[in-house]
């Protein structure tokens, strides 16, 4: 498992050689089953996960209804970053959609790495910037694009998502009803 993460991390982050081994030594493996919580609303998020294999969703509870914020799949980082950074209770759930294998690092260990070498700080900054850009693209799309454009952008960026995520959850993520997403998918299939 650490070989998978080592190859991926060395491609996306400016960490190599000895520092890569130090970075990876701070991660511990964690296995979760479909339906398990990685983070529960109200708990303080004290860890960041790197998904080796599997998928998770981040969701808010709005008057008893699940509202999807984001999906995380293989080779992506996951946590409730606001809770993680501010040491306050999470306001969303992070739940496994599939059996999921992760490598996990604690807040304390990550802070120790940042203090150890500027390469680790740079890596943390790049992860945060990537997450921010993803969030910004979604927010912009929700404001400016119609439902079909949002769906097309989603499947262009993440083509395996429709096969791994139930349609009703994808609809929630896009801010539409499942029936609307079904009509969009039928329309696109006829093209």
Image (tube, rainbow, N blue to C red):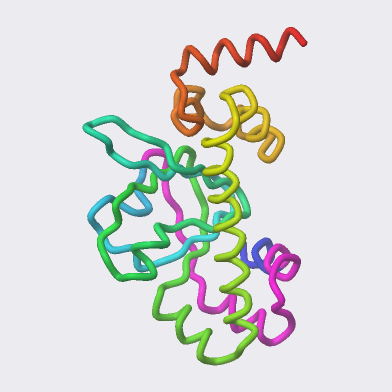
Query: In which quarter of the view is residue 9 placed?
Result: bottom right
Quarter of the image with the C terminus in it = top right
State how many labels appear.
0
Residue at image position (45%, 23%) is 168
- For residue 17, above or below residue 181: below
Report the magenta residues as a range. 7-35
Residue 166 point in image, percent of width and height: 50, 26
- Seen from the viewer's position, the closer of residues 3 and 131 is 131
Residue 87 point in image, percent of width and height: 30, 70
- Left or right of residue 18: residue 58: left
- Seen from the viewer's position, the closer of residues 71 and 29 is 71
- For residue 128, above or below residue 157: below
- Left or right of residue 19: residue 139: left
- Seen from the viewer's position, the closer of residues 32 and 58 is 58
- For residue 132, above or below residue 110: above
| Residue 152 lies within the magenta run | no
Residue at image position (74%, 7%) is 190
Outermost residue to the front: 144
Residue 164 point in image, percent of width and height: 57, 32
């Amino acid at each position: 498992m650490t070989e998978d993460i080592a190859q991926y991390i060395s491609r996306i982050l400016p960490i190599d050689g000895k520092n890569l081994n130090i970075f990876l030594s701070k991660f511990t493996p964690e296995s979760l089953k479909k339906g398990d919580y990685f983070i529960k609303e109200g708990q303080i998020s004290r860890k960041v996960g790197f998904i080796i294999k599997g998928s998770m969703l981040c969701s808010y509870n709005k008057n008893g209804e699940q509202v999807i914020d984001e999906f995380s799949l293989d080779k992506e980082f996951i946590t409730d970053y606001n809770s993680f950074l501010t040491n306050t209770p999470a306001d969303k759930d992070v739940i496994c959609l599939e059996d999921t294998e992760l490598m996990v690092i604690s807040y304390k260990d990550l802070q120790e790495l940042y203090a150890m070498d500027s390469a680790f700080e740079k890596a943390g900054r790049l992860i945060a910037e990537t997450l921010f850009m993803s969030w910004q693209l979604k927010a912009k799309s929700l404001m400016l694009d119609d439902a079909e454009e949002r769906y097309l952008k989603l499947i262009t960026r993440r083509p395996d998502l429709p096969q791994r995520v139930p349609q009703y959850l994808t609809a929630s993520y896009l801010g539409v009803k499942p029936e609307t997403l079904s009509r969009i998918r039928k329309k696109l299939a006829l093209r």
